[in-house]
Image (cartoon, rainbow, N blue to C red):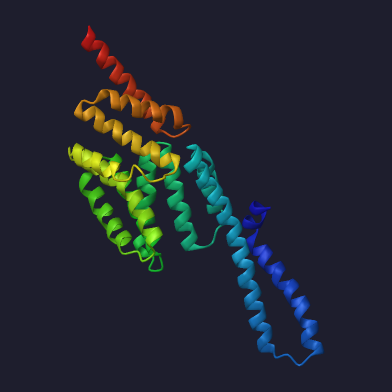
Amino acid sequence: MYRWCAKHGRLIIWLWLLLSLAIYLPLLYLTDLSIIWLFAYLFFMATAAWAFVNGCARTLLKQAVQCLHDHCDPDPLLRETEDQLTYSRSKTYNQILQIDKCVALRYMGQFDRVLEILINLNIDQYSGTIPQNKVIYYNNLADAYIEAKDIEKAMIWQSKARQIAADMKNPKIRESLLDTLSLNDAAILILRGQYAEAELALLSQAGKQKPLVKMISAAMLFAEIGIHIGNFDAAREHLNFVITNGNKVFDVQKAKYMLDNLQNSRADNIL
């Protein structure tokens, strides 16, 4: 039902308006209600119908995001965003769809596509973009540049994201965004060779409850730190956590590769 309603939103709105008109016109004929009330009534009903259709689409998107968060499966999110982009007419909502599509692609390891989509999206050209969406966009763009090993650009976008997040008035939203940004903070510090600082940045968020996919990302960063500082036992522990719990995300393949390298290095040392 949700999918049909979301995909046929315009039809639902027009049918709802026709039904509303069929109810109101007899009242207009039998009473002395003003025609102005008719337009006000139709506007209210159109708004209610649009909110219903939009709610159906967002429910489907939320379910797909939840599948990534809780089960480390980016496939439903990619399918859902690509499907909704074929019929959504809202520029603001399409921004969210494009960003969420990039999140799915990022966890599939398609970093080049992520960077291309985000650069072309250029969210700053839309004056009506809400601050929360800007933070998410900048964070994903910084993450894409981190994967490309472009520290300077990553730091620019990460700084912009952090500035906006720090100014958010809602403390719950602010803390959630800053918690998300902490992963990129640590990744940038690792690229700069500041491993102790990166570990502290991750540990400062370690006690907070996170979606499983974020725990996977944090474990990968802890593993990288462990390898760089020579704490190979800790690195293996984190990599095994990723392999065991990462399900379909690309990090699992990366973790297996890193673990094989660690085991081969140990075997070479023994020999």
Along the line of sight, the residue nearer the viewer: 58 or 148: 58
Q: Position of residue 160 (x, y in %)?
A: 27, 58
Left or right for 13, reference 106: right
Foreground residue among 49 and 88: 49
Which residue occupies 51% across, 63% down? 90
- Total numbered circles: 0
Q: Is residue 253 above or below residue 188?
A: above
Residue 183 visible in this rendered orientation of the protein: yes
Residue found farthest to the top: 271
Where does the image place residue 76, in percent across and percent down from the top left?
54, 42
Residue at the spot x=64%, y=52% of the render? Answer: 3
In this view, the residue in front, 219 or 249, is 219
Which residue is outermost to the bottom? 32
Q: Quadrant of the C terminus?
A: top left
Location of residue 97 with respect to 43 vertically, above or below: above
Left or right? Give the position of 89 relative to 114. right
Q: Residue furthest front?
A: 207
Q: Position of residue 239 (x, y in %)?
A: 35, 27
**Quarter of the image holding residue 167?**
bottom left
Any part of residue 137 in sight: no
Q: Is residue 21 left or right of residue 135?
A: right
Residue 212 locus on image (x, y percent):
44, 39
Which residue is at 58% across, 56% downward?
57
